[in-house]
Image (cartoon, rainbow, N blue to C red):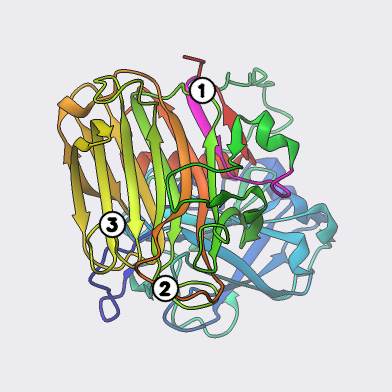
Amino acid sequence: MHNGTSRRQPGIRTALAAATTAIGLGVTALTALPAAAADGSIAVQYRHGGTGSDQAAPWFTVVNTGTTSVPLSQVKLRYYFKADPGASYSYACDWAVKGCTHLNGTFGTPANPTATADRYLEVGFTAGAGSLAPGADTGDVQLRFHRSDWQPLDQSDDYSFGPTQTTYGNWTKVTATIGGVPAWGTAPAGNEATPTPTPTDPSPTAPTTPPAEQGVLFDDFDYADHTDPAITTHGWTIRSGGGGPGVGNATWAPENVTFAKEGTNSVMTLRTSTAGTGTSTRQTEVHTEERKFKNGTYAARVRFADTPTSGPDGDHLVQSFFTINDLTAPMADDYAEYDFEYLPNGGWGEPANVLYTTSWETFRPDPWEAVNQHTEARTSHAGWHDLVLTIDDTALVYYLDGKEFARHDARYLPERPMSIHFNQWLIDFAGQTSTAPRAYEEQVDYLLHVKDEALTPAQVAAKVAAYRSNGTAFEDTVPAS
């Protein structure tokens, strides 16, 4: 599956790959299955649902071909496809005889990716789906998935895709397991599974739970609202009161930070509103309480917006993701700040939308003097973007949607630990002089920091997907500085 070319935008617009390290399931033949699978046998029937150029629609029916009842909670299916570079995907269930509430779908990466299968959709059932009696089937399971940014799909290079399967029929390019034991289908080459030991095999050594990886902060922003005590427990502060940056007399408004589900992911929204005066302006900022982050990888999936959610457009707005420490004195050489900043309507002398990445050595506020290195792209960046910054002992590298965007010099490397921030604020009212109320929103999907490791965007994607696959919404093992 690769991005369609007819609708490709001039700006870079891929999204974070939903990848995780997992063992591909399926076998090339079904004649030597262990007893556990022989006692419970199933077949997977598939048809291509066909929902347009921007969605894949694999529909399934699972049939019990054995002589014993099969609990559906033990059944898992895998549909293999070729992912677009850097893309993430969203799963949906449109309709199922067993009920969509009794189905779940997650994305993963085969142990040995191939040219037609470097990702899979794994579908499982909850206990509420019940069991299949011998000869019975699940009825329709009508699923679909799409790129999170809704870019078009080309499924012609997808391993499990069957464009001529317009009616249900046995399909061995979808694999199935029962209780972890291969029961149906042929996995992509190199991904044949090792069956789970049967009761007649020697008992395996009990697995041990690996210790949490040290030096990682991950947050999926799965909170109830801005008053959720877990926000503070997890080390975040939602800013309140006054102070810069931004227009004078503006207020930082915790209640303008909200949390909600978008598909299967939790999303944090920072809302900034104004009626054209400082006292009517309500800005937003969320940051870590501790300054304990220095070298390593900083990553977030952020949605920038070119237009307000309501009211007139044109304000000189800054939407950002950055890491920073304090300026101890004007031109102090131990200051550090590293920014992704998007100005949807220009500002700072720019006439229109511009994305900056800036690495700061130091500055003096009055009279203004700055020492920094910056890279910019003067085009719209509205929509979801994967932002990655790596800091090692040689350079600062900024990535946008899986591709290197900027590489800044070693002279700008940090001397002291920093905190991590998201904020949205108004530079001035020169872009829009109206006193009509208006509001803008910046959204954040997740935050990942890995201490002292410069990860590639693909490695970032794999870590995030692994956390989500394991149901981990938050982890912080970064030691205090």
> In front: 183, or 460?
460
The residue that disc 1 covers is: 213
Tell me the CA gap for discs 2 and 3.
23 Å
Is residue 220 a member of the stretch shown in magenta? Answer: yes
**Earlier-in-chain disc, 1 versus 3:** 1
Residue sitting at x 63%, y 21%? 209
The reply to whether the C-beta atoms of the residues labelled 2 and 1 are less than 8 Å apart is no
Residue type at mark 1 is: Glu
- The CA distance from mark 1 to mark 3 is 33 Å
Q: Tag 3: Cα neighbours inside 10 Å, few (<14), some, or many (≥20)? A: many
Q: Residue 426 at x, y = what percent?
A: 43, 57
Give the class, few, some or many, for how many residues have Cα within 10 Å of label 1's Cα (few <14, many ≥20): few
- Residue 66 location (% of width, % of height): 75, 59
The magenta segment: 213-227
Does residue 351 appear left or right of residue 166 in this picture? left
Rendered position, 21 above or below 441: above
Which circle marks residue 177 in the picture?
none
For badge 2, the amino acid type reads Thr
**Residue type at mark 3?**
Leu
Camera-side residue of 358 and 293:
358
Q: Which label lies toward us, 1 or 3?
A: 3
On the image, numbered disc 3 is attached to which residue? Answer: 355
